[in-house]
Image: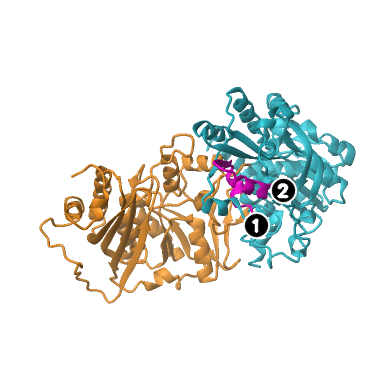
Amino acid sequence: MKFVDEYRDFEIVQNISKKLRNLNGHEISLMEVCGGHTMAIHRFGIPSLIPDNIKLVSGPGCPVCVSGIGFIDKAIECTKIKDVIITTYGDLIRVPGSKSSLEKEKSKGADIRIVYSTLEALEIAEHNKDKKVIFLGIGFETTAPGTAVAIRKAQSENISNFYLLSAHKIMPPVMEALLNDEVKIDGFICPGHVSTITGSTIYDFIPDKYKIGCVVTGFEPTDLMQAIYMLAKQINSKNQKVEIQYSRVVTPQGNTKAQAIMNEVFETQNDYWRGIGEIAESGLKLKEKYKGFDAEHVFDLRVEPVKENPNCICGDILRGLKNPNDCKLFMKVCSPENPIGACMVSTEGTCHAYYKYNSYE
Amino acid sequence: MSDFITLNHGSGGRASQDLIKSIFIKSFGDINSVLSDSAILNIQSEKIAFTTDSFVIDPVFFPGGDIGKLAVCGTVNDLAVSGAVPKYITASFILEEGLPINDLKKIVNSMAVQAKLANIKIVAGDTKVVQKGKCDKIFINTTGIGVFEEDYSYISTGEKVDINDKIIINGFLGDHSIAVLGARNELGFKVDIQSDCACLNELVQSVIKANIQIKFMRDVTRGGLATVLNELSEIINLGIELDEKEIPIQESVNGLCEILGFDPLYLANEGKVLIVVRSEDADNVIKILNKNPLGVESKVIGEIVSDHPKMLVGKTKVGGKRIINMLQGEQLPRIC
């Protein structure tokens, strides 16, 4: 397939694999902070193509995993509003809240529809004027501009029955929070799609302040292998910096139009990250002038605060400090069918991956 | 006769009789035959294969087929992959009030066409009509009987499968899923993919008749290839290694999967069979399958291994290895 097969070239991948094995063999941990990367790493079997001394750690890059239980509870609260249609990306549908999930509510009769874009959700609002249509906005800088476009469109076209419940988050604060903690990360595989919007300059503080290398990377096996090689070389030569491997899409400045509309519609707020805790100015909420579209502002969505299971060590796993086998709950109470913590929720979460693998060992 | 199904068609009275005669008997049987309570069958076989399946699909018409074709092929294939020769099926219908009679005619006609192609007889049936909204247009249940020319019960149990045996698939994966998604207009763009819905009995018999021992055989339907192979590895307590570059997938299906975040190995099929044979038989089986239009794209896609028992491992196109699990829930499009 054009523009895909070229990046899945057996020879190129094997060559990089050889080069990596010929490096000096220092132990290094590289963290990817994008669910798409985690997915691609597993899909192409990247761990089996790199030497044992290079460890890949999945960071807080899956927006579904890091959204607090509270967000799911609020989304479920939304289903109780009279004449409401909930629109959501497919990822959220199975994520457990404290008592239920959207999937369970749907089977009980709630009108919950999976959409592929924010504009599809807006269209549903246009066609159902007698209903309140709430879009569950989730994702990092990748999806936030799309939500912003829908809000702007709703405003300019006077679509007054469209609302946003926002779990949008931004990437740099959580990366800094991890680095301020005692983490064992030697380099970041930086998200490709987030960076397409933000540009690579948002990571400049990481090598400057923390001496940690960053390579912005695409989602194909040649991309990932090359990025791992670039990071290993940076670390070996102690020349940590921000590099763009995904240069066919990402520039240092990013997509300034998308940034502008995001800034027009959203402002940052302190936000809660499942498994990590509250991080200052890491979430996005609608600005004052768009308050009329903010589901939390318009509807009473107060939910009881829920404590995560104190035995869950997802926070340490997301920081690369522990692995799932260190957890008391792992494979006993916590499983893909009954996920307790963030890393078990998504199919590509670290615990989920370990669960599949270890159950056969 | 009216243009739409009414509750009257399910009353058991004159309207029911008319419907049965003018549509079902006309397509499936002999218009002059007496309608009795049971079909009487002639079966000379010590063992028979017996299966049942219900069909619900939205939309009922899709590129490459409709619910009627699906209902016949589905049951025929379940019999065929057990090593049996399908002979008779029954067809029961639950119809929603308001279903256009013409739609019913089309569906029944495509059942008749498939039955003829598969050389089976539709020998019994039933019709119920439910109020509008109580079912989605039409639900069909088919039950089938197949006979064995030899005892092939080991084909279903996988008991003869051994290390080094080869895994064969008869063509492109995922076409049915994508065709149906496209017909639902859920993709947001047009697709030109046709469902692979087809009766596989002739194809399967061509291998059996060549005196090749089929060690295991399943049709690859919901849950996709990944699910069938995970089941097999569990049953036989051995590992399975898939060579992903050999798996036949149409470029357009692959492209859509890239966009939507689907893995084609989990997509549903309605005309695909997975066959496990001895390594030395594999080339011959491919040659035989290639002769049938339903087997032109047949490929050896993997083998049974002693490593990682009960686990399906894929050798990726770039030479990596990944574990391929059973599908949990329905595949959902991802954000990123």
Chain assignment, label 1 = A
Q: Who's the residue at 44% across and 66% down the image?
A: B278
Q: Which chain is cyan?
A: A
Instruction: Tell me what hue chain B is rendered in.
Output: orange
Q: Nearer the viewer, residue A256 or A189?
A: A256
Looking at the rendering, which quadrant does residue B53 occupy?
A: bottom left
Look at the image and give the residue range highlighted in magenta: A71-96
Neighbor class of circle 1 (other Cα within 10 Å; few <14, some 14-19, many 20+) is few
Neighbor class of circle 2 (other Cα within 10 Å; few <14, some 14-19, many 20+) is many
Figure label count: 2
Compute the Cα span from label 1 to label 2: 18 Å
Q: Which residue is mark 1?
A: A99
Side of A143 relative to B243 (left or right): right
Q: Which residue is mark 2?
A: A66
Q: Who's the residue at 38% across and 59% down the image?
A: B284
- Horizontal and vertical percent for residue B300? 46, 56
Chain assignment, label 2 = A
- Horizontal and vertical percent for residue B90? 27, 62
Residue A248 in view (yes/no) = no
